[in-house]
Structures are given as C-alpha cells and as structure tokens.
Amino acid sequence: MPERVTIYDVAAAAGVSTATASKALNDTGRMAVETRDRIRRVARELGFRPNALARSLTSKRSFTVGLLTDDTYGRFTLPVMAGISEGLIDQGVSVFLCTVEDNPELAKVHVDAMLDKQVDGIIATGKRIDKPLPVDLSHLPVPVVYALTVGPGEAVTLVPDDDQGARAAVEHLIAQGRRRIVHVTGPGSFRVVHERAHAYAETLQAAGLAVDDAAILRGSWSERWGHDAVATLWSGKDQPDGIFCGNDQIARGVIDALRERNVDVPRDVSVVGYDNWEIVAEQTRPPLTTIDMNLKELGRQAGLALMRLVNGEAVEKGLWKLPCTLVVRGS
Amino acid sequence: MPERVTIYDVAAAAGVSTATASKALNDTGRMAVETRDRIRRVARELGFRPNALARSLTSKRSFTVGLLTDDTYGRFTLPVMAGISEGLIDQGVSVFLCTVEDNPELAKVHVDAMLDKQVDGIIATGKRIDKPLPVDLSHLPVPVVYALTVGPGEAVTLVPDDDQGARAAVEHLIAQGRRRIVHVTGPGSFRVVHERAHAYAETLQAAGLAVDDAAILRGSWSERWGHDAVATLWSGKDQPDGIFCGNDQIARGVIDALRERNVDVPRDVSVVGYDNWEIVAEQTRPPLTTIDMNLKELGRQAGLALMRLVNGEAVEKGLWKLPCTLVVRGS
C-alpha cells in the first residue's frame, strides 16, 4: 500500500523548502510564477492530496453531512439519500448514513459520532412524516433539515404533497370514465391515510360524484389487505369500477384478487397505486399505474436547503410540499 | 442555534488558563486531581466536545470509512451497510455511503471526496460478485475490503457461500420427500447461476437422484420468468415435485403460476427461493421458504476486517465465504 504523499515529499521532489512548497500550493507568499507552477506540477505528479482535515480546521467546514433515518429497510431513505448525494457531490460533500431504528440510545450515539466529526449539518429522514425520530435534534450546534419525517415548527421540513398526489390519482380514474371509485388504504393511525382520503373525497365531490364514507376502506399496508378488501367489496352489490389504493402493495393485492375473480384490469376496473415502488409496480400484472412521490428530488432539495443554511443564506422555514407525479402503466 | 462550545469557554467557566484546561482535558501535564476533575466537570456541563478533526490530525485516524456501491436500489447494500455500521459504531466509526451506479467518473469523484476526508479505509460492495466496480481501488493509500463485489486476488473479499446455500436448498427439498427436483434460475452470464446450478446437481447426485441438464432452466431474475418456466415445465409430461429457484422473485412467479394451474404448494410441489428478500418472501402465498445470505453479518465482518487492516493487524487475504441459512416458511 503506498504511503500518503505529504508536503515534505513534494518539497523534496521539487528541491525546495517545505515552506516554499506550502506557499506554492496554498497560493500565498511571493515567488516566481515558474517556481509555483513547477511545485504544483510535482505535487500533481506525486498524487499529493491537501489534507482536508487541516483545511477543515481553518474553513470551519468539514464538507460532510449526516443523514439520520429510522427506515432500516431503506425503501424511502435510499432515494432520498441518492438525491442528497447527487445534489451535493459537486460541492465535494460526502454523506454519513446513520440508521437508528426506534432506538433512542443508538440515535444518540450516531448523533454524537457525527458531531464529533464536525458535520456541517444533519438531514433527518424516516419512513413516516408523522413520527419523529427517537432523538431531539432541535438544539444541535449545526443546522438540521427534516425530510419525510416530522420536524419542529421553526425548522425546514420537506414532504411530498400528498393532497396533490391523491388528487392526481383520483382525477386519472375519473378521466378513464370511472364513476364508482373506492379508496383502499392503510391504517388510520397514519397521517397520510387521512390526507389522501380527504383529497379523494374532495376530488370526487368536485367532479359531481357521490361521496360515501363506506367507500374508504382502511386496513394494513399489505397485499393481504388488498385481497381482503376485494373480498369485502365483491361480496356486496354495486361493485366499484375504479380503485385508488393507498400504496403499491395494497394495489398489487387488489389486482391479484381481481384476476382470481376473473375481473379484468383495466377493462372492468381501473386501479391506481401510491409510491411507484418499481419492484412491485412493474411486476404487477398488468403493470401498475401509480403515484411517484419524487423522493430523489425531495432529497436533492433537502441537501441544497441544508447547504444554504450551512452557508448562512436565507431559507424559508416551515413545511415545503413537493409535487408528486402520476406514472401511467397498464392498470 | 447554540454556538459550539470551545476550550476557551471551558477555561473561562472554570476560571483557569486555556493551557490548563487543555492539559486537564487531554490528561497531560501536572495538576491537582481536584483541579483536573473540576475542569472536566465544567466541560461536561457546558457540553464541550473535543474537536475530532484536531484529534484526527494527531492520531492519523479519522474514524470514518467509505462504503462504495454500484447497487442504486440498495437491496443488497442496505443490509451490508447496516452490518458495517453495527460492527463499527462502538468504535466511534461513521460510514460514508457513496452510490456510483456504473459511472466511472462519478466513482472517481466519490473516491476523491472520501480520500480528501482522510477516510481510514474503504469497503467496496455491489449487486453482483462477478462484476467489479467502475473504479480501480487497488492502489489507494488506505486499506480496501471487498464485500459482494469482486476484488483483486491479494485483497480481502467477503462473499456468501453460494455452494453451501444452494446445497441447503436442495437438501431441504429432498428432506420433504421430493424426487423430481428442477432448478429455475437467472441468466448464465452471472457466476452465481453456475455455482448454484453446480451445487444443485451435486446434491441430487449425492442423494442418488437422476441429474438431467434439461432440468436447469435459465432465464431472467423476474417473476415473469417464473411464470414462463412453469408454463414450459407443465407443457411436458413428468412434472417436477420440487422447484429450487435462483431468487425470490422467480420463486414468487413460480408459485403464482402454480396456483393459477391449481397446483397446490406445498402439497403437490415444494418451492425454495434464494435471497430471503422479506418483502417478496413474506407476501408470497404461501410465504416462501428461502435461503438467507446473511448480508448483515457479512457487512459486520467486512467492517471488522477493515478495522484490523487499519490498525495494522494481520488479516487473512483472499476469498472469505460466509455461510447462508435456510429460512423455512410455508412453501
């Protein structure tokens, strides 16, 4: 393994003093342009890498940020992480990923380790927007941005615009000529369940369609619940011709259950999911039409907002709602 | 936002000079035990955090490692990451996650950013063990460990023991009384496809069962291929009573296709998958019996091996094969 190249190596190879080498590389002091250029060329050839830690001590910037998440499976965090990284890599910023589950002690250990490394800031993210991480980040000596998890009122918090996303789903079903549209969704303990259900009802109403509380079926975020919901819906009369599902897994269960009842999707019933989780959406038969929360873009914006805070620039506080996109496939 | 507490603040609050405060906190120099204890108590109360960057310059350790991956979806990398983090957090080590896709330039930018931050070492990981990352890590000034991606011969490379995993799958089918066992797997361009197929054939042979090349069906890593394979197998006579699938998605397609043909799993046919990808395995009807590659443990061991290299301790070079586990569910 090669040793790290130091400024002493550069000085020796260029035949100058360490002080001269340092001046040339830091562009300080006075010297002939040719000397400066020659020292820099030698440094490049040797693969000299200025010590970022030493630079950080001077600039008070470490060019690192921490991403703290309770989403162990990474389903929501990975796209957010990809967006942050994409947004900040050009600025030379690297991202610590810290997964803390629901464990307050582990969260504290990770936060302390990040602060020890003098991160420039922290992005808190998670798997639901109505559940805080198991650690209080409101009094840290570095800026914090919240993405897909709840932050205090005075913080910058980025979330997908669930109202707009749910409207887009229901409007798509209406545009397919569907008139008896039901909503099969997750547990009522989730805030997004209420937001999506509210947008569903308002969109029906705006289109002059009847709104029936019984047409909102709450259960779990699972394929199994999709099957059960279809069994319930098809046990009565007046079956729906459109189903807006609260996530893609429910939608997959719904579509499988419909196929097993010889109900054709999309001829007899149109189905729209939520999440655009490709591994589920693309393998569904037919492939699933669904709402994409654009989590990568959300991560990118969270990273850029954090950098503005780090640089002392003005950033609008409060809740930022980012638009969702309808992805039309075969259902 | 509170300012960072500095050693000056500690000194002022304790009513001592900065030099004395520094000596007390670094446990150097001579002073009364009571003075030292008092200064430390004041530092604790103020929330003083010794500057890890400054410490790093002295110790030549940054207590950071980089995880470089081409697995954008994170399916394989997330459990590896969780294991590394779990293994190293007690040592105060934080992990940079860098996702590089197949992009050599992006990979170089990430590696440079990590080296700039003086990472103690790098773990390279990916989505297949026979495909190198798009960047050469063999001449870096820090140790590199490879996990789930191919490294040079003289490196430490950790992979799941695919031979043992595939044997465990086939032995389980034989133990269920199955005698006509086929293997439905992925594309022949993947090394694991050959390793698993080889282990499948040897295990049948060892049990005195007939081995037929036509019983190894290669396709894509998709549910769709599981459906197609069942259509092929059930178009002939002499249908199998056991199916070992190359991954969980194929197994899910196989099981769905069998149900649609009214073939009962596990009464008529037993099915074993590979990966223990819970989102697929648990939602399959019946839930899928499968092989777990223990990627979290693999990550933990990769992290610990890297730390031994960082500390200059002896580490056995070459390929480390880590055991897989059979997870019995309903299929």
Image (cartoon, coloured by chain):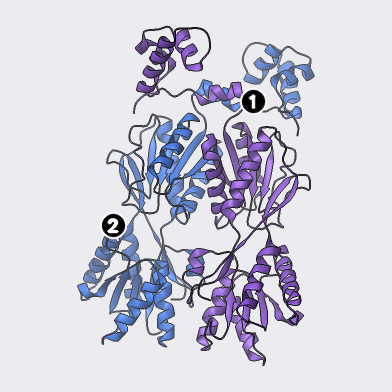
Chain colours: A blue, B purple
Figure check: A113 above or below A85: above
**Mark 2 neighbour density, 10 Å: few (under 14) some (14–19) many (20 or more):** few
Q: Specify whether residue A305 is in view.
A: no
3D distance between C-alphas at marks 2 and 1:
49 Å
Residue A56: image location, x then y, percent: 53, 25
Q: Mark on residue A50?
A: 1
Of badges 2 and 1, nearer the viewer stands 2
Given residues B107 and B266, the one toward you in this image is B266
Question: Quick one: SS at disc 1?
Answer: loop
Figure check: A17 above or below A317: above
Q: Quadrant of the N terminus of chain B?
A: top left
Given residues A149 and B87, the one toward you in this image is B87
Residue kind at label 2, given as amino acid type: Arg
Question: Quick one: SS at disc 2?
Answer: helix
Give the residue at x 42% y 88%: A262
Q: Is residue B302 left or right of residue A71?
A: right
Corner quadrant of residue A153: top left
Q: Is residue B285 left or right of residue B195?
A: left
Corner quadrant of residue A241: bottom left
Q: Mark on residue A191?
A: 2
Give the residue at x 73% y 69%: B199
Corner quadrant of residue B55: top right
Figure check: A127 above or below B141: below
- For the image shown, how many numbered marks are present on the structure? 2
Mark 2 on the same chain as mark 1: yes
Residue kind at label 1, given as amino acid type: Pro
If you read the primary sequence from the N terminus, does the residue marked by circle 2 or circle 1 appear first?
1
Given residues B105 and A98, the one toward you in this image is A98
Give the residue at x 34% y 45%: A157
Residue A82: image location, x then y, percent: 51, 49
| Chain under callout 1 | A
**Mark 1 neighbour density, 10 Å: few (under 14) some (14–19) many (20 or more):** some
